[in-house]
Amino acid sequence: MSDKSSLLSAQSSTAPQFRFAPSPNGWLHLGHAFSALTIAARARAAQGRILLRIEDVDIGRTRPEYIEGIYQDLEWIGLNWEGPVRRQSTCFPSYEAALQQLRAMDLLYPCFATRKEIIDTITQGGVPLDRWPRDPDGGLIYPGIYKDITQAQRSNLLWEGRTFAWRLDMPKAKVVAEKINGGPIIFQESGPQNIGAQKTNDHITCPINPERFGDVILARKDVPTSYHIAVVVDDADQGVTDVVRGQDLFPATDIHRLLQVLLGLPAPRYHHHRLIRDETGRRLAKSARDQGIRELRQQGLSPDNIRDMIGL
Ligand code: GLU
């Protein structure tokens, strides 16, 4: 599917569909409130629907009380979602099917490297760790160990029962995706981004550069998918046309668009909003209890007070 047709297919569906997709590994805080209310405002302006998705693929970090807390906090703050809530933990077969599709395209390989092995490979190669290239999230770019081993070596490691993760062969994936797409892959961004891209009406057109993440992990043994796979499969399955989320996920959109093209999924429009920071300028963490919506509610604050606190 070409970029043009996939962008059009997302836009021509009846009502625009937005989604809020929190991870239930902590209580919601002011940053989530900002996200939820930005989604609500944009959906209202576009006469769209809002869907809710609980991103609980990381089952080990999920707690039922956090999920209950999400429902309570969102209702209190005024986010009205429609339709059934999607729980990622019930969708593993869909994620596996997507991974299988990428495996069949020969774009995934099992990587047996531990973190220590990665660090040792880098430092033994004579490059100090602080000089090694990092991805936009600060992770070390994968140095390629186990990428070019023979099939026999790979079979032996699998037979030994070594733990592995599935990595995307990024250079190859980019070539294949551009071929499918019939040219460079782009996405539409309407958030307050400041990148040298072409501005048309209310959005900019962003070319993707997923290579800056290196060979990303798309599934692990303990979590048999990744955020990247789950988010593109879910957005497509839920018919999401408009992804509104924090600026911290702006770089990851390059991976998401790449996967959408490889998997033949439509392209949503994107809006990455500013992040709410604490008084020291740091992004709010799940542990920032004093900024938790629950705590603020229990202290007697109203939803309007919350809006004031986050400048909405
Ligand atoms: N689950 C992610 C979070 O809570 C958001 C993912 C997304 O919106 O794509 O930060």
Image (tube, rainbow, N blue to C red):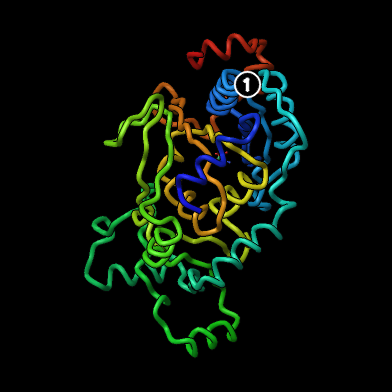
Q: Position of residue 150 (x, y in %)?
A: 44, 87
Ligand 1 lies under 8 Å from the Cβ of mark 1: no
Up-down relation of residue 31 to residue 170 (above or below): above
Q: Is residue 145 left or right of residue 13?
A: left
Secondary structure under tag 1 reads loop
Q: Position of residue 275 (x, y in %)?
A: 45, 28
Q: Nearer the viewer, residue 38 or 62?
A: 38
**Is residue 290 among what the camera can see?**
no
User: What is the three-letter code of the residue carrying label 1?
Assistant: Gln
Q: Which residue is mark 1?
A: 47
Residue 301 quadrant:
top right
Residue 251 quadrant:
top left
Q: Residue at x 41, y 68 (%)?
A: 116
Up-down relation of residue 126 to residue 90 (above or below): below
Farthest residue to the bottom: give it.
152
Up-down relation of residue 102 to residue 77 (above or below): below
Q: Residue at x 57, y 51 (%)?
A: 265
Q: Position of residue 289 (x, y in %)?
A: 58, 28
Residue density around tag 1, few if under 14, some if 14–19, many if 20 or more, within 10 Å: few
**Is residue 145 among what the camera can see?**
yes
Ligand 1: quadrant of the figure? top right
Q: Residue at x 40, y 50 (%)?
A: 185
Q: Nearer the viewer, residue 279 or 143?
A: 143
Up-down relation of residue 12 to residue 212 (above or below): above
Q: Is residue 108 left or right of residue 144?
A: right
Q: Is residue 196 left or right of residue 54?
A: left
Q: Residue at x 69, y 17 (%)?
A: 298
